[in-house]
Image (cartoon, rainbow, N blue to C red):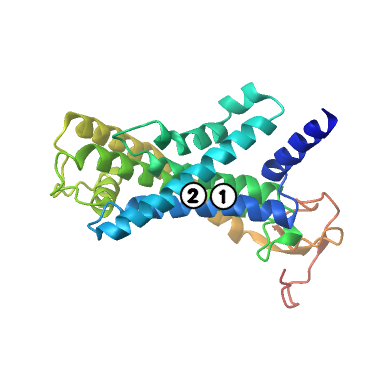
Amino acid sequence: MANRQTLRQQTALIFEKVNTPIEIAINFAILALSILSLTIFVVQTYDIPEQWRSLLNELDTFILICFTFEYLLRLWSAPSRLKFIVDFYSLIDLISVLPLFLIGFDVRFFRILRWFRLLKIIRLANNDLFAVKFKIKDQVIFIRIYLILFSTIFIYSGLIYQIEHPQAPEIFGNFFDALYYCVVTMTTVGFGDITPLSDTGRMLTIIMIITGIILIPWQVGDLVKQLLKVTNQVNTLCDQCGLVVHDSDANYCKSCGAKLRKIDPTQPQLSK
């Protein structure tokens, strides 16, 4: 029993504590499979040779098996399985394997939400293992804003394509048609050259417009605030952890809390 418990703990650490090269490689491999699955979904909305479609189906089936195995491993190794089941990331993992049980409606576009794990990886990972350092909290906020905007548009595009393509393939012929329609709709430009025919599509359009009115100004506002904040940052070296960039009025390091040593502005800026 002790060995089994230890194995569960080690398995949980691989997914949750991204501190070693192996753990980082596994988590980024999962993200790579997610983006590959999204690419397959988009490509299959176009008119492609049947042999390519068959090959992509086999590749996506392999990815689906990997996601299912991953979900079962996470469930098995979770300290509290009930807490795991209702966790946001776990629900996204469950959506990723739903094509095993759903027929007639493709939900692969929801796998875009798995990319929010990138934020968790950046926060947990040992920075020395990255070629690109993520020591500044603002960088994580930038990534979160971009992910929210892109993921929202991508999911709406997948939904409107799934709803409207069977009824109007000449209007919503591929994913790009749906993407174009969603961007135009969410930004409230509304050219009117592409319109949904079904009641479900029209209801979804109403929700998209409301989402565009609320979400886009909110996220763009956050983005502007972060850009203004970054412009007020200066090179101030922390002798304790080596972090260079801090707010102009900071007296203590935002990373380790040590007293800061101000850098002479007449000297060349340090790079990290």
Residue nearer the viewer, 111 or 245: 111
Going 79% across and 53% down the picture, which residue do you hit?
253
In the image, residue 236 sits, relative to residue 145, either above or below, namely below
Q: Which residue is mark 1?
A: 30
Q: How many numbered discs, if any?
A: 2
Residue 232 screen position, x and y as percent:
62, 59
Residue nearer the viewer, 196 or 71: 71
Residue 34: assigned label: 2
Q: Helix, strand or loop at disc 2?
A: helix
Going 71% across and 40% down the picture, which residue do you hit?
11
Residue 270 screen position, x and y as percent:
74, 72
Residue 86 screen position, x and y as percent:
57, 25
Residues under numbered marks 2 and 1 in contact, where contact means CB atoms less than 8 Å apart: yes
**Viewed as shown, does residue 170 lie left or right of 86?**
left
Answer yes or no: is residue 72 visible: yes
Residue 218 screen position, x and y as percent:
44, 41
Residue nearer the viewer, 75 or 114: 75
C-alpha gap between disc 2 and disc 1: 6 Å
Going 20% across and 39% down the picture, which residue do you hit?
164
Q: Helix, strand or loop at disc 1?
A: helix
